[in-house]
Image (tube, rainbow, N blue to C red):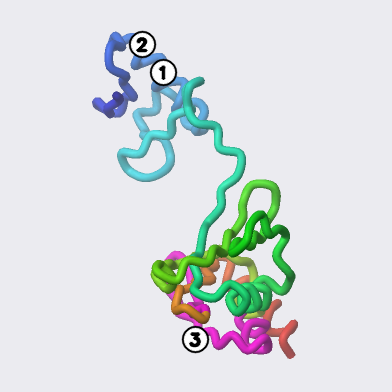
Amino acid sequence: MCRITAGLFQMRGDSEQDSSARSRRIIRRSGRLADSGERPAGREGHVHRQPRGDAMKIEKIYAQIVCSEHVASTGWYRSLFARDSDATPMAGLAEWHHGESVGLQLFEDASKAGQQTLTLMVGGLYGEKARLEDAGLYPREIEPADTASLVRLSDPDGNVVVLAQSTHLLATRKRKDESWTR
């Protein structure tokens, strides 16, 4: 158990001296001086802790989308990712691997289909939207927001797929993407 006390990171059973030393190390790692009186950079009240030795060590994360008809949905996701699935580990399951640590599983279970949302952070939102239109996937209009802009579309079962791009990156890439689509 931990708590924030007067800007210090304190663990249950710590003495005040232990907490002060730990807080100085945390502040030093965040690029701030220990005696500056400033809080570490980041969200107010947020403290980033290093995982303990017994913490779960995750090697790969899969998002899962459930569909009612595997063949039709596999074709739709093939168009979304512009490539075939990377693996079919069992009947009714297809996987797309994105790098070494992220993947998507498409699993057939008609009773749960159409209830999921998948958000994908992309670079080049305008270019991706144009590519999806050309592939016949019918993305909606780009929705601008303060921190990220996004495009929504629905798979054959009604699962929502959201493509999002950080707003500060969007302005610089928009011109590049528009020149690509012409």
State the residue lying farthest toward the left.
5
Point out residue 120 in the picture as x, y percentages from the top left corner: 55, 64
**How much space separates mark 2 and mark 1, taking CA atoms?**
6 Å
Residue 102 appears left or right of 86: left
Q: Label 1 is placed on what type of residue?
A: Arg
Neighbours of disc 2 within 10 Å: few (<14), some (14-19), many (20+): some
Q: Quadrant of the N terminus?
A: top left
What residue lies at 31% left-to-right and 20% top-to-bottom?
Answer: 10
Q: Is residue 33 magenta?
A: no
Residue 71 appears left or right of 68: right
Residue to which mark 2 is pinned: 18
Query: Would you say residue 105 is visible in this rendering?
Result: yes
Label number found at residue 22: 1
Residue span colored magenta: 128-155
Residue to which mark 3 is pinned: 141
In terms of sequence position, does the residue under pointer 2 or pointer 3 come before the other? 2
What residue lies at 28% left-to-right and 16% top-to-bottom?
Answer: 12
Q: Label 3 is placed on what type of residue?
A: Glu
Q: Label 2 is placed on what type of residue?
A: Asp
Closer to the camera: disc 1 or disc 3? Answer: 3
Q: Quadrant of the C terminus?
A: bottom right
In terms of sequence position, does the residue under pointer 1 or pointer 3 come before the other? 1
Closer to the camera: disc 2 or disc 3? Answer: 3
